[in-house]
Amino acid sequence: MKFIKTLFLVLLFSPLIYCQENNNQLFCSKDSQIFGEKISLAKKNNLHTKNINEIIESIGKSFIGTNYVANTLENSDTEKPIFCLDALDCYTFVEATLSLSRIIKNNKSSIDDYIAEIENIRYRDGQINGYPSRLHYFSDWIYEMNKRGICEDITKKIGGMIYSNNVDYMSTHPNSYKHLKSNPENVKALAETEKVISQRRYYYIPQERIALLENKIESGDIIGITTNVDGLDIAHTGLAIKMNSGRIHFLHAPNVGFKVEITKKPLSEYVKGNKKQTGIMVVRPINP
C-alpha cells in the first residue's frame, strides 16, 4: 500500500467525482439518500441517547465498503462547504463521521444541520474565509477542536511524548494543490499558518509504545498517524475500534482503489507496517 497516497492533504492529480452546485454548496451524487440512511440508522438504534464515542463507532462502521476517492473537497473554484458521503478519503471519512455523530447526539436530523456542522469542524473558528481558513494540517485541526471543546487531545495524558512538528509541505509544494498553484496569496497565507503550527507543542505516541498504551484508547477515538515525510505532521487518519479480542484496530479509508475498512491487524501492528509511519496522536470527541 503506497503510504504517500493516503495523505489527506489533497493532491492535484487524484481522480475527481461528479458533484453539483446548489445554493453555494456542492453536493455529490447519492448524498441525500446516504444522509437519510444514517439518520434512519440513528433513530432505529436511539443513538442520540448514547455517548458520542458509541455514536461515532456505529456511524463509522456504517461507512464500511464506501469507496476511497481523493480530491472531493477540490471540486470548486472557490472555497465552499462541499460534502460527499458516497466517496471518502481518510480525512473526509473522519469529518463526516464526527459531524453526523454530533448532530445525532443533538437529536437533529436535517441536512442543513449537517452542513453547518461540517463548516464548524472544517474551518478555523468554524468560519469559511477562503481556502486558507480550511484546517489543512491535521495537527492544526486537533489544536482547533481541542481549543473549542469539540474534541480533547488526550495524547499527552495517556503517555505521549513531545513531537517535533515542523510543517511547510503545502507552501513548499504549491504546484500539488489546485488552490495554491496559481494563487500566491494563498501560498503566503498558508506559510504564515505553518509557522504558527510549528511553534506549538504537540505530543505523540511512538509506534513502539502503541501496544503498551492501547488500553487507554477507546472505540470512537480519532487517530492521526504521524509521519517522517519532510514538512508533514499527520499523513493518515481514522478511528479506533476495540475488537472482541480487546485489541484496538483501525477503521479508515485506506487508499485509492480500496474501500473503508477495519484493519485486520491491530493498530500498533498497522502503524509498524510502514516505515514512514512514526506513531499516533489520539483525540477523544466530547459530547456536544
Image (tube, rainbow, N blue to C red):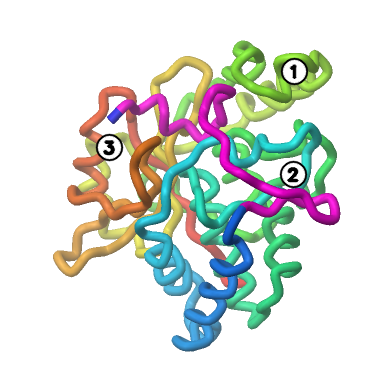
Residue located at (53% from left, 86% from top): 43
Alpha carbon of mark 2 to alpha carbon of mark 3: how far?
29 Å
The amino acid type found where label 3 is placed reads: Val
Q: Is residue 250 left or right of residue 169?
A: left
Quarter of the image containing the N terminus? top left
Looking at the rendered structure, which numbered label has been put on residue 124? 2
Q: Which residues are magenta?
A: 2-28
Residue 176, quarter of picture: top right
Residue 78: x and y, percent? 80, 35
First of labels 2, 3 by sequence position? 2
How crowded pointer 1 is (Cα within 10 Å; few <14, some 14-19, many 20+) is rated as: many
Does residue 88 lie above or below 101 as drawn? Answer: above
Q: Which residue bears the numbered disc 3? A: 271
At 48% from the left and 80% from the top, the residue drawn is 41
Q: Amino acid at mark 2?
A: Arg
Q: Is residue 81 located in the magenta-colored stretch of the structure?
A: no
